[in-house]
Amino acid sequence: MQTEAVQWRYQDLDNLLAQGEWQAADQVTLALMLAATDRTGWLDEGAIARLPCETLNQN
């Protein structure tokens, strides 16, 4: 189940993409991916491989 904060971030991402704010959308995407993998700063191959499918299919 998603937290309210994560749901807000997906809404924020949708808005940024709709406005063509690509760099800001990239930053939100990274933040969501880091949160999904319980990491900070950066993702390695192992963390990416462990991303839940539900997270990748979020809309």
Image: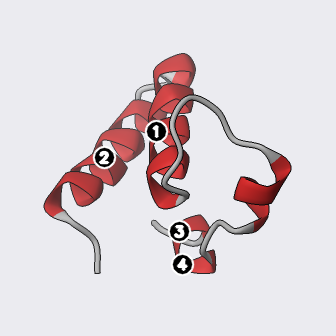
Compared to 34, does 38 lie above or below? below
Which residue in the structure is indicated by mark 4? 54
Circle 2/circle 1 CB separation < 8 Å: yes
Q: Which mark is residue 31?
A: 1
Q: Do the residues labelled 4 and 2 touch (CB within 8 Å)?
A: no
Which label was assigned to residue 50?
none
The three-letter amino acid code for the residue at tag 4 is: Glu
Could you tell me residue 46's position as x and y percent? Answer: 80, 57
User: What is the x, y in percent for residue 7?
Assistant: 26, 59
In this rendering, would 16 be left or right of 34?
Answer: left
Per the model, the C-alpha gap separating discs 2 and 3 is 12 Å
Q: Distance between the residues labelled 3 and 1?
A: 12 Å
Q: How far apart are marks 4 and 2 (CA)?
A: 15 Å
Circle 2 sits on which residue?
Answer: 9
State the separation of the CA atoms marked 4 and 3: 4 Å
Which secondary structure lies at badge 1?
A: helix
Marks 4 and 2, the one that precedes in the sequence: 2
Circle 3 is placed at which residue position? Answer: 55
Q: Is there a contact, CB below 8 Å, between mark 4 and mark 3?
A: yes
Circles 3 and 1, Cβ within 8 Å, touching? The answer is: no
